Amino acid sequence: MNRIKNISLCFRVIFQIILVALPVLLVISWLFAPEPVMLLAGFIKLDAIPASYSGLHTYSAQAGAEPAIMHTLSLGEKSLGCLVSVIPMLIEMFVVYGLIKLFKRYEQGSIFSLEHVKTIRNIGYALLLGQVIEPAYQFAMGFVLTLKNPPGHHYAAISLDQANIGIVLTALLAILISWIMAEGYKLHEEQQLTV
């Protein structure tokens, strides 16, 4: 049990650091947008521009290819982009907060309870919600990034890939596991009452 508590403490601290770092890193990435920011000798790459626009901005477009962002981003555009980026970040922060709560309970020696079930279910729903709003986020970001482009050069790119499918499957799996745990908890409670 001590081993579980110690590992849970480590993960809780890691997730608490991530929870604080997410908004800070978001702001830093938008300060330097559209160029990515490299931290820890390139171990961490912060890119405020969504993957559907990645490589399409003025500074890194391939020779001969027309960039999606045809102007230097103003402070207002960066601020608006940062504001739009807050929406998916809040979902990420909710998931991380749920993991903090889960590992805090494990750290306290509570391995199985109805609160665990609710937390895991909420994490699953948050992951699913994040994927549902992802296309709207990408569309809004395209609007912000290409707003000052010349007429006829506005872009709205929406991309879905294996990562999106993986997150949806993980979300559904978390929801299923929470349902199975809830049923197991009910059976356990019924057995306790019949003894």
Image: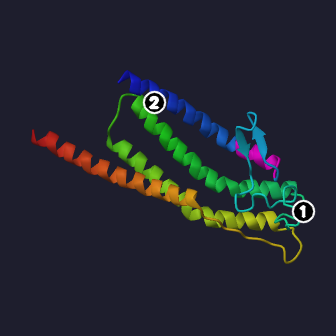
Nearer to us in this view, 132 or 168: 168
> Split into 4 quadrants, where in the image is the N terminus?
top left
Nearer to us in this view, 64 or 131: 64
Q: Residue at x 41, y 33 (%)?
A: 105
**Residue wearing tag 2:** 8
Q: Whole-Å distance between the Cαs marked 1 and 2?
A: 47 Å
Mark 1, secondary structure of its residue: loop
Find residue 63 and report its horizontal and vertical position in percent: 88, 62
Residue 29 in magenta? yes
Is residue 183 rendered to the left or right of residue 116?
left
**Callout 2 amino acid:** Ser
Majority secondary structure of magenta residues:
helix
Mark 2, secondary structure of its residue: helix
Q: Residue at x 76, y 46 (%)?
A: 29
Q: From the viewer's perspective, is residue 41 above or below residue 194?
A: above
**Residue wearing tag 1:** 71
Residue 94 — which label? none
Write down the quadrant of residue 64 in the picture: bottom right
Q: From the viewer's perspective, is residue 99 above or below residue 88?
A: above
Point out the residue furthest to the top here: 2
> Split into 4 quadrants, where in the image is the C terminus?
top left
Segment tinted magenta in the rendering = 25-33
Dot 2 surroundings within 10 Å: few (below 14), some, or many (20 or more)?
A: many
Dot 1 surroundings within 10 Å: few (below 14), some, or many (20 or more)?
A: some
**Callout 1 amino acid:** His
Is residue 2 rendered to the left or right of residue 75?
left
Nearer to us in this view, 121 or 161: 161
Find residue 113 and report its horizontal and vertical position in percent: 32, 40
Mark 1 or 2 closer to N-term? Answer: 2
Residue 8 in magenta? no
- The total of numbered circles placed on residues is 2
